Image: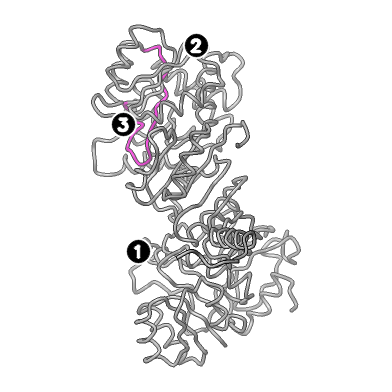
Amino acid sequence: MESKPVLIVDDEKNIRLTLSQSLEPLGLELDTAVNGEEALAKLKEKNFGLILLDLRMPGMDGMEVLRQVSRLRPDIRIIIITAHGTVDSAVEAMKLGAVDFIQKPFSPTEIRDLVSRVIDREKLDEQKADDYHSSIELAKRCIGDRNFDAATEYVRKAISLDPSYPEAFNLLGALLEIRGSNLEALKHYRAAISLDPTYEPARRNLHRATSMEPKGTITLE
Amino acid sequence: MLSNHRLHIIVVGCGRLGSYLANKLSHDGHSVVVIDNDESAFNALSSEYSGFRVEGDVTEFAVLKEVKPDKADVVIATTREDNVNLMVAQIARRIFRVPRVMARVFDPKREEIYRDLGVETISPTSIAGDEFLKALKKQPIIEKAEP
Amino acid sequence: MKVLIVGGGKLVYFLTRALISKGYSVTIINRDAEECKWMSRRLKATVVYGDGSDPQILEEAGSHSTDVMLAVTPNDQDNLVICQLANLRFHIPRTLAVVNDPENEEVFRKLDITAISTVGILSSLIEQKAGFDQIINLIPLSEGKINVTEVELTKDSPVAGKALVDIAMPENSLIASILRGGRPIVPRGATLLLPGDRLIAITLPENYGRVLRMLTGDVS
């Protein structure tokens, strides 16, 4: 995956520029698209390994692009770019295999680190993964492959290795919601919040899951 | 010319000074985030500006957190109000530990205290005043101006 | 005792009236000329027209001989600068800033400024499940008969490292809560007090000094 090109999809020129500049040191082949349509067209021309996708775009919105990419090329990894305050990071996103998010504004280091992490994740050796962080990464790889049961196992393993991180509990809650075990999911969102009352993803999930609004989105980031 | 290393810089306030800095820094290849209370202020940014823009009141802690000062190398406070600049500069330095923090402070009387607190202050009033005095000394007045 | 208040509106008017009736001497700094005139007519207080975050104005208002400073303007940033100038430049012993954004309460504390959030007080009153008439106003309680004080323990504190049960608290005093790492702990006998803990101590006026000395080791 390291050698495969990366596609940047964002309607804002400054974001495309910033991303290109920030990722330059990684030495990856980069390409850009200004909207969903162009992105899908480019997918047919090149074999991308990773897409950086802005959720909020005019025309075909990010979620729709995600749906189509997920359908056409489920193997491509996706990093979602979000704006503050948008109710995003849907259970839909995770169902479609997207588990990595970055919120604007971000520093060059932030996006570089995230891209590196997603790329390195592909090389992880399951046999050797016996610490919290590797287990979480493997869980995310499974989500990328839509293998939610395996993902759940890895998250549980991560928690047993180190139960002090809210991220694992929130992730587990989201996986349980996808499975339909809503009550159990709530318990895990609450567990995440009790570990860190300021952990936004869990707060949003709990709020959404406990409000009257039936339709909502699960927040991962 | 700034160092070759690409910095992540937050510019608070997109008025004349803020937009000037944001445009230049972005042009020089740095990663820039501009925040201003008023969206129309971003019109002052050049079309080549390749950084982020965020609308919000930086004296609200939740808004400040949104621009992730913990990831910044530099914070420059350029709003029209000294006190806003001093507040955000201090929070950036002492709470988020931003390595370099600079604030424009119009009133020179407030500068000293803030330097002691680790904020680099630039007072346009003192600078302009000193420049005027320097210029005056260079060319003493000998004759009256022609009518 | 001399109190300096920066701000305006009904709050400052009634606060000043209350303080004067208790025998304090009050100076107000206000930026609105009309309001200054109005207040100086109605209050037996010195009213200074100007910007309370201007060191010059603070000087004119007698900051050097002020005991207590309250910054109650509508802007958190102004209240911050006013209190910092009061502390660092004029060495006013007690300063208090009102903050509008409740999150700034903790922020100001980290900048060594005591701050109080009215929004915080009101929203926690609403959140508490008891009816409003059962809510006890914490500061002050019972017409000054009870003191609620926050004390931060340093490593030199005589009680640091000790279990609560091993500390001989005077009669009619107790440690109601401990804030550790930003989280409240309900202390039990076995609870060990650690440096950095912020203790909420409940005392009567007569044992207040003793309890404070016990916790801080300060004999001054």
- Say which of marks 2 and 3 sits in front: 3
Q: Is residue A167 left or right of residue C199?
A: left
* In front of the other: B18 or C202: B18
Q: Which residue is mark 3?
A: A56
Image location (x, y in percent) of residue A14: 40, 31
Name the amino acid, label 3: Arg
- Say which of marks 1 and 2 sits in front: 2
- As measured in the structure, the alpha-carbon distance from the residue carrying label 1 to the one carrying label 2 is 54 Å
Q: Which residue is mark 2?
A: A1
Chain on which label 1 sits: C
- As measured in the structure, the alpha-carbon distance from the residue carrying label 2 to the one carrying label 3 is 26 Å
Q: Residue at x 42, y 60 (%)?
A: C101
Which colour style is shown? one colour
Q: Which residue is mark 1?
A: C126
Dot 1: element: helix
The reply to whether the magenta stretch includes residue B80 is no
* In front of the other: A127 or B49: B49
Q: Tell me the quarter of the image containing the N terminus of chain B.
A: top right
Q: Residue at x 59, y 29 (%)?
A: A161
Q: From which residue to which does the magenta span run?
A: A74-92
The image shows residue B122, relative to residue A180, as above or below, that is below
Image location (x, y in percent) of residue A215: 24, 35
